[in-house]
Image (cartoon, rainbow, N blue to C red):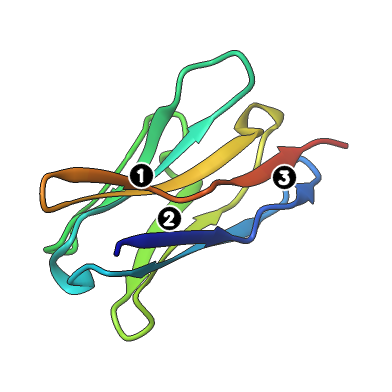
Amino acid sequence: QVQLVESGGALVQPGGSLRLSCAASGIIFTFTTMNWYRQAPGKQRELVATFTGSGITNYADTVKGRFAISSDNAKRTVYLQMNSLKPEDTAVYYCNTNWAGAAYWGQGTQVTVSS
């Protein structure tokens, strides 16, 4: 049974930082591509960052240079370090992976950037 559990969302002021975590179970974590998506109210869910099974990272243009995705195989956890946060980063952030032909999502964690 695949489970993804996110944590770390919070209310933060513009310019602040947060680190989101996604703990995974039920997959061979080391070789699995992990993604962070986000969905703002009234908008489509968008891909924010990817960490491939071979350690390659990719980012949306809107977060490049501010966000960093990383992975800890021992903890089976993928992280999203978010710096220089902007109000437009406000969204529910979701962890995602594709395993054995199916897509799996976490429950989401709310990030609100506001003064």
Q: Residue at x 72, y 51 (%)?
A: 16
> Contact, CB < 8 Å: mark 3 with mark 2?
no
Q: Which mark is residue 49?
A: 1
Q: Residue at x 36, y 65 (%)?
A: 70
The image quarter containing residue 42 is top right
- Circle 1: is it few (<14), some (14-19), or many (20+) Cα within 10 Å? many
Type of amino acid at the residue the image marks with label 1: Ala
- For marks 2 and 1, give the one nearer the viewer: 1
| Rendered location of residue 45, percent (x, y) | 44, 26
How far is mark 2 from mark 1, CA to CA? 8 Å
Q: Residue at x 48, y 49 (%)?
A: 67
| Rendered location of residue 115, percent (x, y) | 88, 37
Q: Residue at x 44, y 45 (%)?
A: 65
What secondary structure is marked by label 1?
A: strand
The image quarter containing residue 56 is bottom left
How far is mark 3 from mark 1, CA to CA? 20 Å
Q: Which mark is residue 68?
A: 2
Type of amino acid at the residue the image marks with label 2: Ala
Determine whether, in the image, residue 2 is placed left or right of residue 111.
left
Q: Which mark is residue 15?
A: 3
- Circle 3: is it few (<14), some (14-19), or many (20+) Cα within 10 Å? some
How far is mark 3 from mark 2, CA to CA? 15 Å
Type of amino acid at the residue the image marks with label 3: Gly
What secondary structure is marked by label 2?
A: strand
Q: Earlier in the sequence, mark 3 or mark 2?
A: 3
Total number of numbered labels? 3
Farthest residue, direction bottom: 74
Determine whether, in the image, residue 59 is placed left or right of residue 53.
right
> Contact, CB < 8 Å: mark 2 with mark 1?
yes
The image quarter containing residue 14 is top right
The quadrant of the rendering that contains the N terminus is bottom left
